[in-house]
């Protein structure tokens, strides 16, 4: 019994290592570098904006201080990088493979569909999370010199806010994964995924134009408006790491469920 299972376990490890080489490592590294450069570039631009513009941004997001203005913009870069780096790998491993009729060949391998899905999607999610964490760390370092003693944010809170958005990106993609393994149109997949990415930002956009609409629902406002990560800096410090720690097992559950779903559907 032991002799029969050992080679199988070894071959599975080898298969996972082989598929891991296909992960968008270069793309994730390039995206992380690009994200860091965008953060630094936006800082160089924003600090030179007229004071009236800075005041408008402070009023729009109910924040105070140059560091907060910089951070609210940087968080979008973190969220974008983590989400779309992972999405590119997931779409290639699922929807594009089905579109190009590669999925049938992949499923003909002597591995179960659930193993195939895990081996091809987990590295993409990890690549997106890794790139997002790098940009989040760069954001915290870049914002730190602008933080003053009276500011509402801290470097630790900035890092925590970035990690929370990385966790949000991974959670959203994990929720979409069972749908992606069934989809046959790459453009439709990108459209649906983009809609899912922008959906959490809509309450923040509404808050900018109609902050009075949120006044009767303070708890709801702090739950769905992005700027709440700055309003509750001390909470963001621990919330980000905790959220990321929770997102990882949730992603594993979604990967397993997607593999089972693929096994029960026709790949043609």
Image (cartoon, helix red, strand yellow):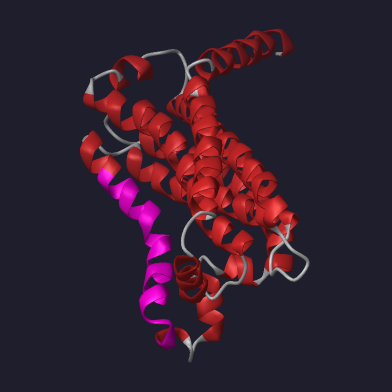
What percent of the width, then of the height, locates residue 236?
68, 62
Q: Kindly give the residue lying farthest to the bottom in the view shown.
A: 216
Q: What stretch is highlighted in magenta?
A: 191-212
On screen, residue 207 versus residue 126, left or right, reads left
Quarter of the figure with residue 126? top right
Q: Nearer the viewer, residue 40 or 83?
A: 40
Q: Which residue is drawn at 46% across and 70% down?
A: 52
Q: Residue at x 51, y 28 (%)?
A: 28
Q: Which quarter of the figure is the N terminus placed in? A: top right
> Image height check: is 222 above or below 195?
below
On screen, residue 45 versus residue 138, left or right, reads left
Q: Nearer the viewer, residue 208 or 236?
A: 208
Quarter of the figure with residue 195? bottom left
Predominant SS of the magenta segment: helix
Magenta span contains residue 176: no
Q: Which residue is drawn at 65% across and 11% down?
A: 10
> Image height check: is 257 above or below 217?
above
> Image height check: is 21 above or below 247?
above
What percent of the width, then of the height, locates residue 154?
73, 60
**Residue 257 appearing in the image:** no
Q: Kindly give the residue lying farthest to the right in the view shown.
A: 149
**Residue 183 appearing in the image:** yes
What percent of the width, then of the height, locates residue 26?
50, 20
Q: Which residue is drawn at 52% across and 71% down?
A: 58
């Amino acid at each position: 019994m032991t002799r029969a299972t050992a080679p199988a376990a070894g071959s599975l490890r080898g298969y996972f290592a082989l598929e891991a080489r296909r992960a968008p490592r270069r793309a994730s590294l390039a995206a992380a570098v690009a994200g860091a450069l965008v953060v630094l570039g936006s800082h160089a631009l924003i600090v030179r904006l007229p004071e009236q513009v800075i005041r408008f941004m402070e009023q729009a997001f109910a924040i105070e201080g140059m560091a907060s203005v910089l951070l609210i913009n940087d968080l979008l870069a973190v969220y974008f990088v983590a989400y779309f780096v992972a999405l590119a790998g997931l779409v290639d491993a699922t929807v594009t493979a089905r579109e190009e009729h590669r999925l049938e060949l992949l499923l003909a391998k002597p591995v179960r569909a659930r193993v195939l899905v895990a081996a091809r999607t987990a590295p993409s999610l990890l690549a997106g999370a890794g790139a997002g964490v790098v940009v989040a760390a760069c954001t915290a370092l870049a914002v730190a010199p602008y933080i003053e003693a009276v500011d509402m944010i801290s470097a630790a809170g900035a890092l925590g806010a970035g990690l929370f958005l990385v966790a949000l990106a991974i959670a959203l993609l994990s929720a979409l994964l069972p749908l992606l393994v069934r989809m046959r149109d790459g453009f439709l997949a990108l459209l649906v995924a983009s809609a899912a990415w922008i959906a959490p930002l809509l309450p923040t956009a509404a808050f900018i134009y109609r902050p009075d609409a949120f006044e009767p629902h303070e708890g709801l406002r702090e739950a769905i408006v992005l700027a709440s990560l700055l309003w509750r800096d001390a909470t963001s410090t621990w919330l980000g790491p905790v959220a990321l720690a929770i997102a990882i097992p949730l992603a594993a559950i979604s990967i397993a469920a997607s593999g089972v779903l693929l096994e029960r559907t026709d790949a043609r």
